[in-house]
Image (tube, coloured by chain):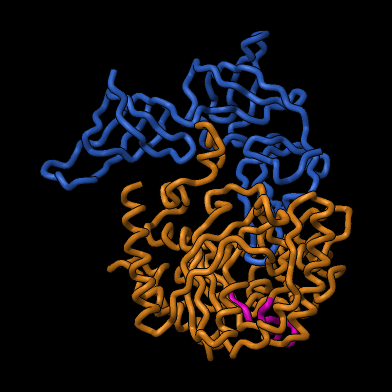
Amino acid sequence: MIKAGQIDKGTALLIKGQPFVCIDREFVNPGKGSAFVRLKLKSPSTGQTLQETMKSQDNAEDITVVDRDCQYLYNDGENFHLMLTDNFEQIEVPMGNFPDYQYLMKDGETYRCTFWEAQLLEIQVPPKVVFFVAEAEEAVKGDTVQGATKYVTTETGLKVRVPIFIKQGERIRVNTETKEYLERVNN
Amino acid sequence: MKAAAKFRSILYRNIRSFFDERDYTEVDTPILSTTLIPESTIENFSTRFQNPFLPSTELYLVPSPEIFMKQLIARGLGSVYQIGHCFRNSEQLGHIHNPEFSMLEYYTVGADEEESIRITEELFASLLPKDSPKYLRPPFARLSVAEAMQQYAGVDLDKHQKQATLAQEAKRLGLTLPDEPESWEETFNRIFLTFVEPNLPQESPLVLERYPKQIECLAQQDGAYRRRWELYVKGVEVANCYDEDRDQATIQAYYRDEYARLVQKREESGTVIPDVDPSLASVFSAMPPCSGVAMGLDRLQMLLMGKSDLEGVILFPLSGMLTSGNTRNL
């Protein structure tokens, strides 16, 4: 058991007998009310999301999870195919359980993954990732307004809004949580 | 950092000229107090006065300057305002929370909570940069708590004045309630914070008014509700206003009941139990009719700067001092 106030992003909980992972938590303290925590929870097996508001002092049932490294092999449009690096066992998970992850994960890259028993609960994509710019719109000639932006597509298919000086073939660092451009990476 | 510091400096100058032009007196009251107004839901910071020749005394950091400002009004100072620091102790460090925060409080003598809406609209108008987005601009939209509960959670508050039936409503909405009993207010907050607050309209600043009487505070009661409003801007709570209660018996009862609740809660949690001074009820009841507004200035600046996080608005947030570089999820 843990206190709801200790729940963090990535904490795995049992809600009505089903495992859920906290994907967002926000402390709320109404003007004249006790401390609450507003949770967004996701079921890794069904992708269902759930909203719960608990008092920081409420008890919640946390579950013991294990972190293991997985290599991302590919996706077939429906499932992600991953391989556990410690025993080379291959696993499949529905892409719907991890929306947008196909744009954040690179083929062949190893990610820390969280398991509860045999269930994959979380793929830990680093908060900042360097991507290769596969396609870039041409900057509009004569458009030298400061702060002008355009869209580029990374090798994973992620569309990112970048300053107009970014060209195809360059590398950029992206915040994977907000999917926002951070900086150009020089080779 | 530089931009935020400069922004704050101009913001304070503008706030001061707004109130000075309207003949309010700016006051400067203590942050350290020997007693606090009991508020069972607001955790406190305590420290100790130590002197080799006097008994050691526990002191408390004020969660709001209200306790002193009301004494000044009772002594006939008229309308007053203050910009100062307030302290609320809890485990929360979030993107819109910091245990130490800047607060503007203004009390208008002769005004009720309705008049305070008008003054706050004028204040907002005077602080807005040119071409500010519509979601910051007065006039404020208005919605009562009962209307909001009906609209966003389908709960008829008039029908659910008892915790037992409100708990049924919470379960109907799919919320999980703990096994141990809880107050009407706690169940209300679960529903409000899950279904209502995140969905409140954000096109204009919103005055959410007429709070349920079960949420104890020093705002005048009016039937099943209280003369209290909160201002939400872009979904963020930035101000709280009361038509101040001046009835000695009611204030005394509030002190007694709220302090009992506070002591019971904090004996369980082992947190700070402040001393209180119930004789202040007679001081507060000596005030002329007035309405007070408390506005969080860090949040106000955040909104005026178009940000959604206090990071970079508060110059030295406690989270930064507490964590050594790992601020993920804060």
Front residue of A9 and B90 = B90
Q: Residue at x 71, y 84 (%)?
A: B282
Q: Is residue B286 left or right of residue A76?
A: right
The residue lying toward the viewer, choosing from A146 and B1, is B1
Q: Is residue B17 left or right of residue A123?
A: left
Which residues are the magenta region? B218-229
* Location of residue B132 (image quadrant): bottom left
* Foreground of the two, B278 or A18: B278
Q: Position of residue B152 (x, y in %)?
A: 64, 68
Quadrant of the snapshot with the N terminus of chain A: top right
Q: Colour of chain A?
A: blue
Query: In the rendered image, what is the letter of the chain coloured orange?
Result: B
Say above or below: A110 vs A141. Answer: above
Q: Position of residue A66 (x, y in %)?
A: 71, 22
Q: Is residue B222 magenta?
A: yes
- Magenta residue check for A106: no
Name the residue located 80 percent from the left edge and 75 percent from the top edge. Answer: B160
Q: Residue at x 26, y 43 (%)?
A: A149
Q: Residue at the location (65% across, 18% down)?
A: A68
Counting every numbered tag in the picture gives 0
Residue closest to the eye, B53 or A4: B53
**Residue B194 found in image quarter:** bottom right
